[in-house]
Image (cartoon, rainbow, N blue to C red):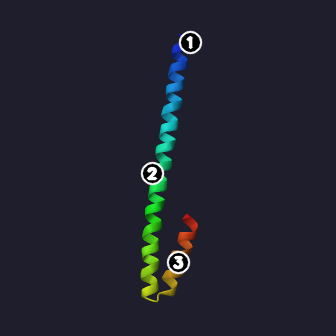
Amino acid sequence: MENNLLSVSKQSEVEVLDSVYAKMVLDKALRDFRKEQIQKEIDQSLQDRNKEEFLRLTAELKDIS
């Protein structure tokens, strides 16, 4: 019986760790995607000579980096 409880406990730990790792991977992918979007928008704001948009976007990029 005790062996079975240890097996269930270990399985639960593995499932929790898998969930945490999956969340970390997803968060990084979303952050990287947003960084790429912001960088494109920064390039556009430079082309448009839009200082306010440039400053807003660079501040956002700093926050997520």
In three-dimensional space, the C-alpha distance between marks 2 and 3, rounded to whole angstroms, equals 25 Å
Residue at left offset 48%, top offset 38%: 18
Task: Tell me residue 37's x, y (percent).
Answer: 42, 69
Residue type beneath disc 3: Arg
Label 1 sits on a secondary structure element that is helix
Q: Residue 50: x percent and y percent?
A: 47, 87
Q: Residue at x 55, y 64 (%)?
A: 64
* Residue at x 50% of width, y 81% of height: 54
Q: Is residue 52 left or right of residue 33?
A: right
Q: Residue furthest bottom?
A: 49
Disc 2: which residue:
26
Q: Secondary structure at mark 3?
A: helix
* Residue, disc 1: 2
Q: Name the element at disc 2.
A: helix
Q: Disc 2 or 3, which lies upstream in sequence?
A: 2
Q: Which mark is residue 56?
A: 3
Residue kind at label 2, given as amino acid type: Leu
User: CA gap, disc 1 to disc 2?
Assistant: 36 Å
The reply to whether dot 1 and dot 2 touch (C-beta < 8 Å) is no
- Marks 1 and 3 close (CB-CB < 8 Å): no
Query: What's the amino acid at mark 1?
Result: Glu
> How many numbered circles are shown?
3
Q: Residue 3: x and y, percent?
A: 54, 13
